[in-house]
Amino acid sequence: GNNMLKDFPEETTREFNEFYKKAKKALIPVWYETKVNTPAGGDSYQNGWLIPRIKDEEFDGIICTIRDVTKGKLAEKAILESEEKLRTILKTALSGFWITSNQGELLDVNDAYCHMSGYSHDELLTMKISDVEAIESPPDIKNRIINITKNGSDRFETKHRRKDGSVYDVEINIQYQPFGEGQFICFLYDITERKQAEEALKESEYLYKETQRISKMGG
């Protein structure tokens, strides 16, 4: 019969021939998926089955099914590239960063959060939110995850526990992303100094008011 690949570049023909040889030699259907450089100079992605025809227990040609999956592959490639760019940016961000599962598992963290918490990247990827959360209980965390899933986002303050046991204040901004079973993009800010400044201001205001009160009593 006609060679359906005769007009395609050598690289495409060579890759496809590997699948063809495998099906011919084993006399079993072979699934293929390949990037095709078309005669027009573009790229397309195709998959399908190479099904050997057998006559008198001998190879007697091949049946090829073809499905063009270019749109899906290009969309997948674009998502992966954009995610990679995003991860690169977030890895170098000054604020802490998490990706968590809907079970509260830490799926990814950046260097800034490693520095904040005292844990290594590998250690954190074996942990859950409850392992670093110093105020909310596991049921509280579960309820918050449910609410964020419904509402799409949340911003709140809490406290985290470092590896050395010390506790610090954090502000967390969370966005829900409905990928797979659901993921949460989290930005975490160490607000310990801000909280200390707020407490100092409250204390100084209290002392000022007390001084004023006492001076009026004395007058």
Image (cartoon, rainbow, N blue to C red):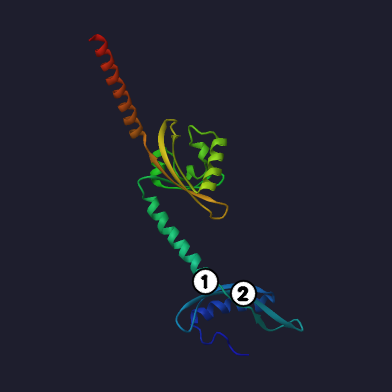
Give the residue furthest to the right: 56
Kind of residue at disc 2: Gly
Mark 2–mark 1 Cα distance, whole angstroms, equals: 16 Å
Mark 2 packing: few (<14 Cα in 10 Å), some, or many (20+)?
Answer: some
Which-is-in-front pick, marks 2 and 1? Answer: 1
Point out the tag, 2 or 1, that comes first from the N-terminus.
Answer: 2
Q: Position of residue 177 (x, y in %)?
A: 50, 53
Give the residue furthest to the bottom: 1
Query: Disc 2, disc 1: CB below 8 Å?
Result: no
Please indicate, yes or no, whether residue 84 appears anywhere in the rendered image.
Answer: yes
Q: Report whether 213 appears left or right of 23.
A: left
Kind of residue at disc 1: Lys
> Tag count in the figure?
2
Q: Is residue 158 above or below residue 60?
A: above
Q: In what quadrant of the picture does the N terminus appear?
A: bottom right
Residue identified by numbered label 2: 48
Which one is in front, 191 or 85? 191
Please indicate, yes or no, whether residue 101 appears anywhere in the rendered image.
Answer: no
Q: Report whether 114 appears left or right of 27.
A: left
Q: Position of residue 170 (x, y in %)?
A: 41, 37
Name the secondary structure under disc 1. Answer: helix
Which one is in front, 142 or 203? 203
Q: Position of residue 55 (x, y in %)?
A: 75, 84
Mark 1 packing: few (<14 Cα in 10 Å), some, or many (20+)?
Answer: few
The disc placed on residue 133 is: none
Residue identified by numbered label 1: 71
Q: Residue at x 58, y 52 (%)?
A: 181
Query: Quadrant of residue 25 in the image?
Result: bottom right
Q: Position of residue 121 (x, y in %)?
A: 45, 45
Q: Residue at x 39, y 55 (%)?
A: 88
